Image: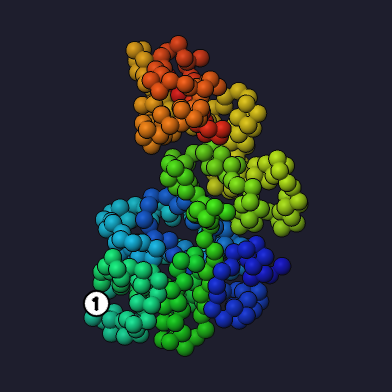
């Protein structure tokens, strides 16, 4: 099957300019395309992984990806979907984040022999001469039209700075620069980027009189309408130091029954025939599909060994089996428990709860266990007697486990 049809069948595509032309181009030619990643954190997230999968499908079909690191545009910050101005980050912080992104992307795409390219828009944006930029680029943008786009219109009541207003012009220039340098014909991105992407696509067509295209894919959301990869503790990161392989596995293993087939299509490279077999499963049988979803993603992000360890640990927990070394773990000094340590305070320290009131509420609802014993007392204190072979296991609800070790 041709790549446009693959992306369509798996449910990626949201909008595209000149869709029939683009289908013909992608299915019958080899092009260079790009996706931008603003360096707002020091790790990519599971939300970014959908974009990476699109790049992998495209590269597999012979197209050349440009991974554009937003070292320049991050200096401003995309106003899309924000009610307030983003926090302004230092150049040093942005450069560090961009390096982290580059390291992660280099493991997920094939950059050998020019099959993929890294670019950083700091290389051209930070040296702009304002007057020259406005004379060449600014004259092609209508303020009236820009104010009709949701990314700006939704900010008019709260206030919109000129600083943020320039973001669309800079992102649009990225497309023009990559077209001129690499012959880039297509920009891809999430559906929330549509208005920004139209600016670049129109700019290249206007200044270069050539056919280029933009295409967005659907944002990764759950059946409950929540962005996938968001938890009470925060994002699911691709960096194993921020989210362990086991935690990622457990998050994916516990997705809603309504989501598992959709996520298999979007987030794994499994063949559609195999996914259609999983689609026939119902009820508890769907756990097989969830397990495969978790295994495939952890394998591709962290390697097969970590995927196998996470699978083993997960199965042990779901069967109420023995503890596993792959469970999220916190280490404490033995002295911390010699005189007893309040359980609710401990839960706060290890990040299982956000506040003491949440801990008390969970205990009241029988939602906290220590070594499989339901906790009944808000004031319960843990001592060295609660540890077996130097460890104990705290459980929140049915699926969140955490090991406490003493040294």
Q: Is residue 109 left or right of residue 268?
A: left
Q: In the rendered image, which quarter contains the C terminus?
A: top left
Task: Pick the residue in front: 270 or 193.
Answer: 193
Residue 46 x, y percent position in the rendering: 50, 51
| Nearest to the observer: residue 237 or residue 364 | 364
Q: Name the residue rendered at 35%, 77% in the picture.
A: 147
Q: How is the image coloured?
A: rainbow
Q: Is residue 400 above or below residue 144?
A: above
Q: What is the total number of numbered labels drawn onto the structure image?
A: 1
Which residue: 36% across, 31% down?
A: 356
Percent position of residue 92, x then y: 28, 54
258 left or right of 192?
Answer: right
The residue under the point 28% across, 85% down is 135
Q: Nearer the viewer, residue 160 or 2?
A: 160
Can see residue 268? no
Q: Which residue is mark 1?
A: 130
The relative height of residue 395 versus residue 79 in the rendered view (above or below) is above
């Amino acid at each position: 099957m041709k790549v446009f049809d693959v992306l369509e069948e798996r449910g990626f595509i949201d909008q595209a300019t000149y869709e029939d032309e683009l289908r013909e181009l992608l299915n019958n030619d080899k092009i260079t395309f790009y996706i931008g990643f603003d360096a707002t954190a020091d790790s990519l997230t599971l939300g970014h992984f959908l974009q990476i999968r699109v790049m992998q499908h495209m590269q597999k079909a012979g197209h050349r990806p440009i991974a554009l690191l937003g070292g320049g545009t991050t200096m401003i910050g995309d106003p899309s979907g924000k009610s307030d101005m983003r926090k302004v980050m230092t150049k040093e912080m942005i450069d560090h984040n961009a390096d982290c992104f580059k390291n992660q992307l280099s493991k997920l795409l094939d950059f050998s022999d020019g099959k993929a390219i890294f670019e950083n828009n700091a290389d051209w944006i930070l040296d702009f001469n304002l007057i020259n930029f406005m004379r060449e680029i600014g004259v092609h943008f209508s303020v009236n039209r820009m104010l009709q786009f949701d990314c700006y219109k939704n900010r008019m009541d709260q206030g919109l700075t000129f600083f943020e207003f320039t973001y669309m012009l800079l992102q649009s220039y990225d497309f023009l620069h990559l077209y001129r340098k690499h012959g880039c014909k297509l920009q891809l991105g999430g559906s929330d980027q549509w208005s920004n992407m139209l600016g670049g696509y129109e700019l290249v067509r206007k200044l270069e009189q050539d056919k280029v295209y933009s295409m967005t894919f659907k944002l990764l959301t759950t059946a409950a309408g929540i962005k996938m990869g968001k938890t009470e503790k925060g994002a699911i990161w691709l960096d194993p130091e921020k989210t362990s392989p086991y935690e990622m596995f457990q998050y994916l293993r516990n997705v809603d029954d309504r989501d598992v087939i959709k996520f298999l299509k979007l987030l794994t490279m499994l063949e559609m025939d195999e996914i259609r077999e999983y689609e026939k499963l119902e009820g508890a049988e769907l756990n097989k599909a969830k397990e495969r979803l978790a295994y495939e993603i952890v394998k591709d992000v962290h390697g097969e060994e970590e995927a196998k360890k996470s699978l083993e640990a997960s199965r042990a927990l779901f069967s109420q089996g023995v503890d596993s070394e792959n469970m999220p773990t916190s280490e404490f000094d033995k002295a911390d428990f010699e005189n007893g340590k309040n359980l609710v305070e401990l839960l706060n320290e290890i990040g299982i709860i956000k506040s003491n009131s949440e801990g008390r509420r969970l205990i009241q609802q029988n939602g906290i266990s220590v070594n499989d014993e339901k906790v009944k007392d808000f004031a319960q204190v843990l001592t060295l007697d609660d540890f077996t072979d130097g460890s104990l296991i705290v459980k929140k609800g049915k699926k969140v486990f955490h090991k406490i070790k003493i040294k």
